Image (cartoon, rainbow, N blue to C red):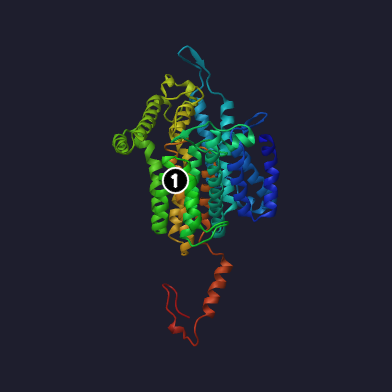
Amino acid sequence: MASLAFFAFIPFAIAIYGRLPRARAAVLVVLTGSLFLPEFYTFDLPLFRPLDKDDIAYLGAMIGAVVYHSRRVSGARFGLGPESLVILIVLANLGTVLANPSAMWDEGRLEDGLTFYDVVSQAARDALSFALPFFVGRALFSSREDLRTLLSGLAVAGLVYAGLMAAEVVLSIPFRVFQLSRLVYGFSAGVSFRWGVIQPTVFMEHGLSIATFMAACLLAVVGLARAGLTMPLLKPVRAWPLVYAGLFLSRNVAGNVYGLSLSAVLATCKAKTIARVSVLLALLVISYPSLRMFDVFPAKGILNLAGKFDEERRRSLAGRFDEEQYVIDLMGDRFWWGWGNIMRVPGAEGLRGWQGGGFEGGLDGYWVIELGVHGALGMALRLSPLLLPIFLAARRMRKLRSEKERVLLATLMAIVAMRSVDLLINGWWNNLPVFLAGALYSFAGSLGNVPTGARRRRREEEAEALPEPLSAGALPARRGVAPR
């Protein structure tokens, strides 16, 4: 079933583009691939890295767009947007290899040095993880209707996944363990329990990944309701409790905090205030690594505060802070370029939960994983595609006259900012945030722009609507323009 799903997905994507409008087809293809393809299955290609579900999803979205919307894809000019940062990422990867050419002895074990093949392999991974999803989002979305379609797609996906999560929880009562991925594809994520009940994963990698996704869907529902727009299946006001039920079933503290706090901001604040909150979250992502490296971040105060509410949360946070400090102390002369692999770091076995398979074996935060593997430069370059569109959208917010456009744009900003903040404490999980960031970048450049012909027609309609008679002197003079 896993092989069949992979091979059938690209023809499925092409067929969807042939039947649906561009933006709706892109949303359906991306979300279907991200949410329903098998998580732990890869397709091996000769002389190339194995393709996973994210690669297949965005390759399908890109191929379908090229087949049916080639002019729009070519007009977006691949490589002229922020996805061109992948070139700098490849150069940074080359620096990592040049900084780690020699084999090292680590407690009687010889760890190989990095070679040019590592540059090629990592370049392919970065192109598929950053450049392709970002360009798909940037090329296929532009108008307010496209933005509404994107948020509606997230809202409906949240409703569907909430039902699947409830099914896993309910059916796990008589069967002890019930996972849809195991039922459909024969393999699934590891089983974890919280509060004596299974933590649902559906077709995702981990309970944490499904929690952040459901939080994004919840924000999309609230944004649509705030803008006074509808969505398929249910009205946003009625969909909100159902989507939040799915978020609650994830039983993840961070996801619930993101969803509830930002939902309150979206529901009660003006669009400009929501945009400012998103910018502050982006600034937190930028500043947090530096604050941790220079030991300025108030980690002890946060631990004491967390201990007043939940001792287990305090221990979990303390473990994460210890892991971050451990990696920072191990960087040494590899601060800018990284070690490339944790197995090359002397004493890396000191990491909690280390399994010998790379930094991912014992670390939680994406930023500290990237710091250890690719250094400070590689980490900054990989966070840039998520953060840059937030600042550009904040500038565009001032020029938008439509309140609906401002609310919808602020909603997408909050979703991308939320997922960026989560990278400080959790892993990457999937490429959906980069896709949303690419769409946000496109909206930041296109919303509020009126074509010349449409602007001329609007002025003519306004002139025809003026009451008669009206003398030229009665017209209010604009600055620098004499009245007719």
Mark 1: few/some/many CA within 10 Å (<14, 14-19, 20+): many
Quadrant where the image shows the N terminus? top right
Q: Residue 180's image quarter?
A: top right
Residue occupying the far top of the picture: 108
On the image, the x and y values in percent for residue 250 come to 48, 41
Which residue carries the number 1 mark?
A: 418
User: In percent of the image, x 43 and y 19: which residue is there?
Assistant: 346
* Amino acid bearing label 1: Met
Q: How many labels does the image show?
A: 1
User: In percent of the image, x 64 and y 42: which residue is there?
Assistant: 59
On the image, the x and y values in percent for residue 97 come to 52, 26
**60 left or right of 400?**
right
User: In percent of the image, x 47 and y 64: which residue is there?
Assistant: 402
User: Is there any visible trace of residue 197 in the rendered image?
Assistant: yes
On the image, the x and y values in percent for residue 189 come to 55, 33
- 114 relative to 223, above or below: above
On the image, the x and y values in percent for residue 60 come to 65, 44
